[in-house]
Amino acid sequence: MSNSDNTERLLLQILWDCLREQSLLGSPFFPVLFSLTVHLSCCLPYICLDMLCPRLSVVRRFKIQPQSTVTWVMTWRCLRKILYNHVCYIFPLSVVYWYWRPVVSPPLAPAMLSVVKDVVACLLLFDMQYFFWHLLHHKVSWLYYFFHKEHHLYTATFSLATENTGVWEMLSLSFFTTLNPALLDCHPLTEMLFFITNMYLSVEAHSGYEFPWSPHKLVPFSLYGGAQHHDFHHLKFKVNYAPYFTHWDRLFGTLQGAGTQNKSRNPETLKRL
């Protein structure tokens, strides 16, 4: 094992030892507090940008739909929905899950390479599951109107709209998120890192901002869609069903790229939409 591998393993071990010392980790309250804290932490920078956007042109130039404004009414509506879903649904389910599958804390942390492979595998699995779930809910009209329409209340995405969903959608996606690490028998630390990564990427995809450092620009060959990819789905509805990667949309002919998106956002095209 190289010095670099030893250092990475040591850092993960220190992190895991610190987490294991926290009594909250084994509590039924931990999943809901963890989920809410991570989600709102991911949203906070974008909430600040939304407040600054109407006043600062330097922020507005990175907004995908600069003609749209995130109001306090929209912000509080989504915040109430997030808190309501976490208290009324995620918390009771996390208690059931805690009782059914108690937290196991192995003494050793996973290797860094193992963490990366498992997180990527979980993301790819979630991407596939969400694509087919999402496609089905757009193709079957009663599924869309009863279960998915609420998420399309806003045609311009913003961070807090990530979890602006009905109960069925929230529970379905939570099920996929929880299922995949269990299927792959991931280490609890890997599971937590997957949850954090998944929540960040989901919020970033709904952020409504396109920066030079956005994640999709770090992935070659346009394999990752990013915020512009998903924002166009909310604008057009019938394209770009996958949450992160682009291969499923390519295979099913539902992919629309950045060039098409930019063209579709001129004022005349927006009026026609």
Image (spheres, helix red, strand yellow):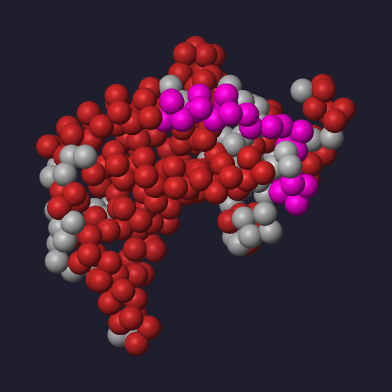
| Quadrant (top left, top right, bottom left, bottom right) of the N terminus | bottom left
172 is higher (above) or lower (below) than 8: above
Which residue sits at x=59%, y=60%? 219
Looking at this view, is 263 or 89 the one in front? 89
Whether 221 is among the magenta residues is no
- All told, the count of numbered labels is 0
Q: Is residue 12 visible?
A: yes
Left of 11 or right of it: where is 236?
A: right
Which residue sits at x=71%, y=32%? 68
Looking at this view, is 30 or 144 the one in front? 30
| Quadrant (top left, top right, bottom left, bottom right) of the C terminus | top right
Left of 199 or right of it: where is 243?
A: right
Q: Quadrant of residue 153?
A: top right
Q: Position of residue 176 (x, y in %)?
A: 35, 38
Which residue sits at x=52%, y=20%? 150
137 is higher (above) or lower (below) than 208: above
**What residue occupies the far front of the structure in this picture?**
55
Q: Position of residue 27 (x, y in %)?
A: 16, 44
Which residue sits at x=12%, y=37%? 99
**What residue occupies the far right of the structure in this picture?**
268
Whether 80 is among the magenta residues is yes
- The stretch of residues the image draws in magenta is 56-82
Left of 43 or right of it: where is 17?
A: left
Q: Is residue 152 visible?
A: no
22 is higher (above) or lower (below) than 172: below
Looking at this view, is 151 or 44 the one in front? 44
Q: Quadrant of residue 236?
A: top right
Q: Position of residue 107 (x, y in %)?
A: 14, 66
